[in-house]
Image: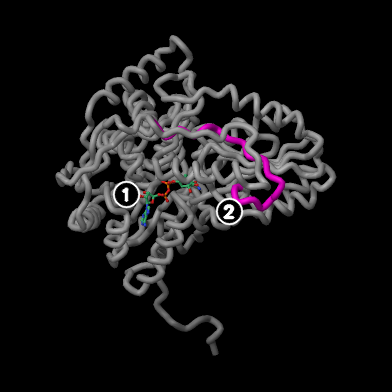
Amino acid sequence: MGKGFFNVPVAINEPVKSYALGSPEREAVAKAYKTMFNSKTEVPMYINGKAIKTGNTRTMSPPHDHQHIVGEYHLAEQSHVDEAISTALEARKSWSQLPWEQRAGIFLKAAELIAGPYRAKINAATMIAQSKTVHQAEIDAACELIDFLRFNVQFMTDIYHEQPESTSDAWNRLEYRPLEGFTYAVTPFNFTAIAANLPACMAMMGNVVVWKPSDSQIFSAKVIMDVFKEAGVPDGVINVVFGDPVMITNTVMASPDFSGLHFTGSTFIFKELWKQIGNNIHNYKTYPRIVGETGGKDFIIAHKSANAKQVATSISRGAFEFQGQKCSAASRAYVPSNLWPEVKASVVEDVKSFKMGSPEDMGNFITAVIHEGSFDKLAKYLDAAKSDADAEIIVGGGYDKSKGYFIEPTVIVTSNPKYTTMCTELFGPVITIYVYDENAYTETLKLVDQTSEYALTGAILSTDRYAIQEATNILQNAAGNFYINDKPTGAVVGQQPFGGARASGTNDKAGSALNLLRWVSPRMIKETFVTPTDYRYPFLGE
Ligand code: NAD
């Protein structure tokens, strides 16, 4: 703190634009999409603020048009990762000493750049790279990212305000130091906002970062790097490297200065990374902080008192937006027998009305899944459901990868509450429904709790308060984000801090002060005003 106790702008959620026909935002994003889709973007790595081109490249293609090339990115050798680490450590000398208001200024500027001049570009890049509809891109790449940046600045100052009591003869001060060493951000394909937030929030707290984005998100990661640069993130503070995740991770984790992992992605990879950190623990100068938000098998349970149309809409919206590729997407539902005929009719009608195709056609609700690996895995589960005696596909089930990786939104009904797709995270537009005896509510709640290793999100729909209370109790540990009479998706920064427990992650709640606290190591400073000069305490008196 320099020369004043500065207030930061009060964070307010960025309003979601409508993209209605004829709106200026629709025109702007359509234009940006066309330009970016029809040109070739070269994405270098950024180390110490310099664009690094290795000549060893990989092409980038939209999931909905996989033969079309929109550019290429450069891959790291081990020497580039070493350079990213040493440059980060060098940058730390100045960055960690910079007053917080200077760091805040940079990230508040980044938020405004995305809200204004970069909005169409970051949304179009997300539509192309991750095959998001314009609405999904807007709530992710624009609004959620803006919210992360603005709210985190506010949370940072809230943290700095937390100070211990002092007395007239001793002043106690807590200094929220950045971690000693450098941090490592490993980010998933599915949210541009998460990709940006993981490195940005650590940097905001004074840390330096090596960032490895997902191969499938690099096209939109380029826009993030452009924004960081224009906002004034100094050279070396956030260094981005692409390529072999194993080589990059091995190099990062071999460094004695590695001090924190901020990961979002699948559970298996996170557990492997945790294990690797454990195996190296004797080599580190400090205990690395480990934060990981991972998979989910998110549920909807309806009580017999629920409104069938509301249950159906929660399923249709909760399971299929962005092709179910949200960690929070509903992928198992428990519907009581009395509501099932009406819920079934509504869900089937909804799903049949979804239009599927490229996000460039803004009338499409469903677009492609991220890559061939995901497509093939989903197709395998759909084929199995077609032949398994305890499963029935009531709508969808088709797939086609001739042009893009298109999987039809699919509803499986199973008579086996432990059927494979009730337990396994598929990460696609597939929900499995188990119809339970309307009088077996309590047993079904226990089943919901015990069916999956995950505990990310879940929802109860009911008009009966006792039933809501019972679900809230029995499902206490089954979800880190629990929704009453809503779908289990759509967490908003500053309103519903996000994260789950059990196999779903460390539950450090992205978009809250709880997360930022993981990236500081407080130093307690006690200053005594009149220092004693005689060791003898009064009780020693003769
Ligand atoms: P992923 O695990 O395949 O990849 C995540 C990141 O890990 C990528 O950058 C990838 O390159 C990297 N990676 C892959 N293998 C690695 C290795 N051996 N060593 C080091 N890094 C490696 O996940 P994804 O497909 O990008 O994202 C989908 C997953 O993320 C789903 O499981 C989803 O539930 C989860 N997710 C969770 C949250 C949450 O908040 N809980 C949010 C978004 C996504």
User: For mark 2, what is the residue?
Assistant: 454
For the residue carrying disc 2, how many other residues have a C-alpha within 10 Å: few (<14), some (14-19), or many (20+)?
Answer: many
Q: Is residue 419 magenta?
A: yes
In magenta stretch: residue 290: no
Q: How is the image coloured?
A: one colour
> Which quadrant of the figure has residue 406?
top left
> Which-is-in-front pick, marks 1 and 2?
2
- The local secondary structure at tag 1 comes to strand
The residue lying at 15 percent from left, 44 percent from top is 55
Residue highlighted by disc 1: 212
Query: To which quarter of the image does residue 465 belong?
Result: top right
Residues packed near mark 1 inside 10 Å, few (<14), some (14 to 19) or many (20 plus): many
Q: Residue at x 17, y 44 (%)?
A: 52
Residue for point 18% across, 46% down = 56
Instruction: Name the spot of residue 515 as percent of width and height, x first.
Output: 47, 50
Q: Residue at horizontal 46%, vertical 11%?
A: 21
Alpha carbons under labels 1 and 2: distance apart = 25 Å
Question: Which of the pair 196/112 is nearer the observer?
Answer: 196
- Quick check: 211 above or below 144? below
**Nearer to the camera, 381 or 295:** 381
Residue 109 seen by the camera: no
Which quarter shows the C terminus? Answer: bottom right
Magenta extent: 404-421
Mark 1 residue CB less than 8 A from any atom of ligand 1 = yes
Looking at this view, is 195 or 527 the one in front? Answer: 195
Q: Position of residue 439 (x, y in %)?
A: 84, 45
User: What amino acid is at disc 2?
Assistant: Tyr
